[in-house]
Image (cartoon, rainbow, N blue to C red):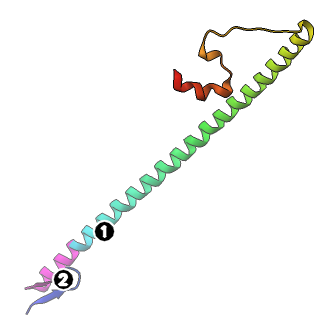
Amino acid sequence: MRYWSEITKQFYDTEKACLEAEFQVKEEQNREKIRRERAEREAKEKQEKLAAERKTRAAEVEEARKAMVAAQKKYQEVLEAFVRDYKTYHFSSTSIEDVPVLFSTFFDWFK
């Protein structure tokens, strides 16, 4: 008598051979499922880690921007007071780093 396996889609001479083949296929499917789940979990953890790092670095950028705005405000106040007292202020720039921050991304092309 021959035995047909719906899992392997093959005939086998003995029931034992049929069951062993099905068991091997199921084990392989389980290993593949576990590997796939592990890969998905690792990918998700990596995405979460990258998102957390991005959030942290975005907070650093925001703090630096706030400090820059405060420094520009202080500069503007001091400059206005100087101009009010002495009517003029002049400065010379010898470096592209002296260009205001607003234009720095534009001038990065020329560095």
Nearer the camera: disc 2 or disc 1: 2
Q: Is residue 105 above or below residue 11?
A: above
Residue 35 location, x and y as percent? 33, 60
Furthest residue in direction right, as rendered: 85
Residue located at (28% from left, 69% from top): 29
Residue located at (51% from left, 45% from top): 49
Residue ID for mark 2: 9
- The answer to whether the residues at label 2 and label 1 have Cβ atoms under 8 Å apart is no
Q: Quadrant location of residue 53? A: top right
Q: What stretch is highlighted in magenta?
A: 10-24
In this image, 72 relative to 109: left or right? right
In this image, 11 relative to 80: left or right? left
Mark 1 nearby-residue class (10 Å; few <14, some 14–19, many ≥20): few
Q: In this view, does 32 lie above or below 71?
A: below
Residue 15 location, x and y as percent? 14, 86
Q: In this view, does 26 lie above or below 69?
A: below
